[in-house]
Image (spheres, rainbow, N blue to C red):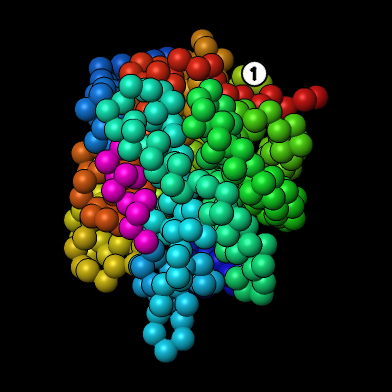
Amino acid sequence: MNSVMEKFGIRAAAATLALCGAVTAKPARAQGNDVAQVVAYVKALGVVEPPAYNEPSRLALAADPLGCEEHPHAPGPGGLGESRPAYLWQHEDKPEIATDYDRHRAFYGCLDWHSAVNSTWMMVSLIKSDPAIAVGPDIRSELNYHIQKQNIDGEMDFFTHLSGVGADYEKPYGYAWLLKLYGELKSWDDPDGRRAAAVLEPMATWFAKAYEKYLNSLNYPIRVGLHPNTALDMGFVLDYVVNTHDQVMEEAIRKNAMRLFANDKHCPTGAEPVFGDFASPCLAEAAVMGRVLSPQEYAKWLTDFLPPVYSPEFAGYGKEIDAVHGNNRDTTGTEEEGLPNAHLIGLNFQRAADLMWISRSLPARDPRVEAYRKLADINGKQGYSKIGLGGYLGTHWLATYALMYENLMETGSPAAAQPPQKVVASR
């Protein structure tokens, strides 16, 4: 808990404690889902058109990772791109960037390590779903330059020699993203994909073992709406599982999801959002449980976990997230007053992806499916309306979260033609 307080502040740690205590407490609210009321709620939402997603949209999203992959992390400690332990910068008399860092590191761009990893994932996902994308040659060039044996050897040397307070650097969020990236490469039937996957495989193998050990060691889940959220990171690793068929990790995710979440009820949706969140704790958990339970089991679990879609407790998921007005000092490092909060902008996309997962995990005829899908598109449109307002603190990662939502859409993205990725719990 001390490390959580140090990294995310006393307020975030307090929010964690509140959620952990409240998730099993039964609030005074109506339970169950009245079909007539669900139908009326869906009708009241009206016609919701998903955001346009086409070639210009994909090019606009691709511009962000292509623009930041060669932009080295800023020096720490304290400021933008906190880089302790000394991944990129050495701190003696003054910060000095490592000599030949681009030959001994693979993920040195995009403000911080995990953002460099998820930006790489984004480029791979884009070119896989749209092989003819105009920036395809640029994406291939970035992959071939960053994912070379010497770079990955340098990454492995760094991570395998971490110790002390720095031993948990980028764990679990960065680890989960590295595995998601490897899974995307491993399932890409392309010479560049096969080459990069082979180079990255030793790192993915080591990270998988480390993540599994971490997951098994948790006494309680982490429920903050930030990087260490247990359910959020499980979802990324499940994407790796589906693409690699890693049965050991599949069982670890299934077992721990059931251990940590199966008995949860009455998630405190009314407490969301918390300032600075980029993930919804309640929706992230609901999304991951939809991937480890059968549709019938999940429908029952979800009824106990989330309030009815037509209830006041659920209404917040359809409302605008105000990331622009008031004192919105961004939580990712800037001291500039009035800058839109990039995390809250990203929360729209993360909500949209989770709502889509929930809709796809329920039985097809469940009356809630259409409500969750419409709410996903409402949140997606709200995210796009602000995606350019966060400055570099937003552009280095917001497009990644937008693409995760697009990849789950049933129209627009070629990736949406894939069947739902579900790991069904065995009985």
- Residue 320 horizontal side relative to residue 424, left or right: left
Q: In the depicted view, which residue is nearer to us: 14 or 352?
A: 352
Q: In the depicted view, which residue is nearer to us: 73 or 102?
A: 102
- Residue found 71% across the figure and 38% down from its top: 249
Residue ID for mark 1? 296
Question: Does any portion of residue 406 appear in the rendered image?
Answer: yes
Image location (x, y in percent) of residue 340 = 23, 56
| Image quadrant in which the N terminus is located | bottom right
Q: Answer with the quarter of the image where residue 316 lies.
A: top left
Q: Answer with the quarter of the image where residue 32 lies.
A: top right
- Give the extent of the magenta segment: 62-72
Say if 43 sits above or below 147 in the image.
above
| Image quadrant in which the C terminus is located | top right
Image location (x, y in percent) of residue 253 = 69, 39
- Residue 146 horizontal side relative to residue 426, left or right: left
- Residue 80 horizontal side relative to residue 308, left or right: left
Say if 290 sits above or below 82 in the image.
above
